[in-house]
Image (spheres, rainbow, N blue to C red):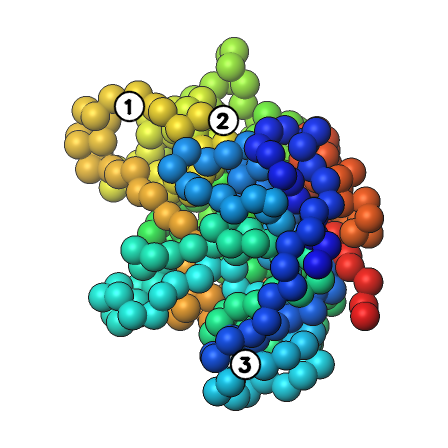
């Protein structure tokens, strides 16, 4: 079976179409014929190689996908062949203590489609039935492929981990990524007053279309991130700051926190190691919190909001599968805004 990915770790020059075995569903599993798949920043890290994460090669990329039920494994009920579905890319074992408590994202055997397993940029994907959900009617296959990873990440980060409450001052660092566009919407849905902080004035302003109340621009000169956010908050500090950039921004995010404020970190695209003044944390009784993916209950909540139109996937671009390499390189475009989606032909 043909898939888009790589044989050797490296940069975009390593991308190619590869051959992997066609999967068959076992008991409790579903095989989905993929119609659309989306890239995430995670795919760049997977391609480069993630320390401590063994990745089978040749490897197919893609953590997001939507399509139609193709085959049902023994014991699967509630899904019919041909039904339009989307995939939850978070895979848990269902047997450990965390899973039994409904805290699936803390499963010690937690895996992500396209990182720890073969991904969605191929004809067929097999997943446990609990990971295959009816596609909300209001979403196309492209929109459905753009939604799962970013919205579940945003929902857990803002609601569960960040604890955003009505009236909270919320800052989103960065404006163009898929998760950022999802976080803006989720924070507003939870009642937050949201500001987007970006190095790009154009991207910051575009973020207003997805619910941001205000937009500010920062730089490394006279307008550093902490000063810009401190001024925006009228010197009260920010209650919740979403930061997926990492090393260049997290220390400044901490300095911009209100008393009891939280920096929620879901990634480190610009570097994983930071130096923070602990005195700021304990004196303001503030915290840095990590978050990733979501529990089954949280994913179900996301689907409800997507189906009702309260959350909307943001698609930057759509390309046919044969142009997947060009689609991947779109990550480096300065005007990237939202998710990159690749469409596959129907059988």
> Could you tell me if the residues under marks 2 and 3 are in contact, i.e. CB atoms within 8 Å?
no
User: Label 1 crowding class (10 Å Cα cut-off): few <14, some 14-19, many 20+?
Assistant: some
Residue 73: which disc? 3
The secondary element bearing badge 3 is classed as loop
Q: Name which of mark 3 and mark 1 comes first in the sequence.
A: 3
| Residue at which label 2 appears | 270
Q: Is residue 110 in view?
A: yes
Disc 2 versus disc 3: distance between alpha carbons? 42 Å
**Who's the residue at 78% across and 59% down the image?**
344
Residue 110 vs residue 188, the one in the foreground: 110
Horizontally, residue 96 falls left or right of residue 39, namely left
Quadrant of the snapshot with the N terminus: bottom right
Q: Name which of mark 1 and mark 2 comes first in the sequence.
A: 2
| Residue at which label 1 appears | 276
User: Label 2 crowding class (10 Å Cα cut-off): few <14, some 14-19, many 20+?
Assistant: few
The secondary element bearing badge 1 is classed as loop
**Who's the residue at 69% across and 51% down the image?**
19
């Amino acid at each position: 079976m043909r898939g888009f990915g790589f044989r050797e770790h490296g940069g975009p020059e390593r991308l190619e179409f590869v051959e992997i075995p066609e999967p068959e569903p076992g008991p409790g599993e579903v095989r989905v014929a993929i119609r659309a798949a989306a890239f995430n920043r995670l795919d760049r890290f997977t391609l480069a190689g993630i320390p401590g994460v063994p990745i089978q090669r040749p490897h197919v990329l893609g953590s997001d996908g939507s399509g139609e039920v193709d085959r049902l494994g023994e014991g699967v009920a509630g899904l019919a062949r041909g039904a339009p579905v989307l995939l939850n890319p978070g895979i848990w074992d269902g047997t450990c203590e965390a899973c039994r408590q409904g805290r699936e994202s803390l499963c010690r055997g937690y895996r992500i489609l396209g990182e720890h397993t073969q991904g969605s940029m191929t004809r067929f994907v097999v997943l446990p039935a609990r990971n295959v959900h009816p596609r909300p009617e209001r979403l196309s296959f492209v929109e459905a492929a753009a939604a799962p990873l970013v919205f579940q990440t945003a929902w857990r980060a803002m609601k569960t981990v960040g604890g955003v409450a009505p009236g909270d001052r919320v800052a989103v660092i960065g404006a163009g990524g898929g998760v950022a566009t999802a976080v803006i919407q989720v924070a507003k849905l939870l009642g937050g007053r949201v500001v987007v902080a970006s190095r790009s004035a154009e991207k910051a302003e575009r973020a207003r279309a997805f619910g941001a109340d205000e937009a500010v621009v920062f730089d490394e000169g006279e307008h550093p991130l902490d000063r810009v956010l401190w001024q925006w908050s009228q010197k009260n500090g920010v209650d919740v700051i979403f930061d997926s950039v990492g090393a260049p921004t997290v220390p400044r995010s901490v300095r911009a926190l209100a008393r009891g404020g939280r920096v929620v970190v879901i990634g480190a695209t610009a570097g994983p190691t930071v130096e923070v003044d602990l005195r700021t944390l304990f004196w303001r009784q503030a915290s840095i919190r990590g978050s990733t993916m979501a529990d089954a209950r949280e994913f179900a909540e996301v689907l409800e909001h997507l189906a009702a139109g309260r959350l909307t996937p943001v698609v930057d671009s759509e390309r046919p599968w044969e142009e997947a390499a060009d689609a991947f390189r779109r990550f480096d475009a300065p005007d990237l805004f939202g998710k990159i989606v690749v469409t596959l032909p129907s059988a």
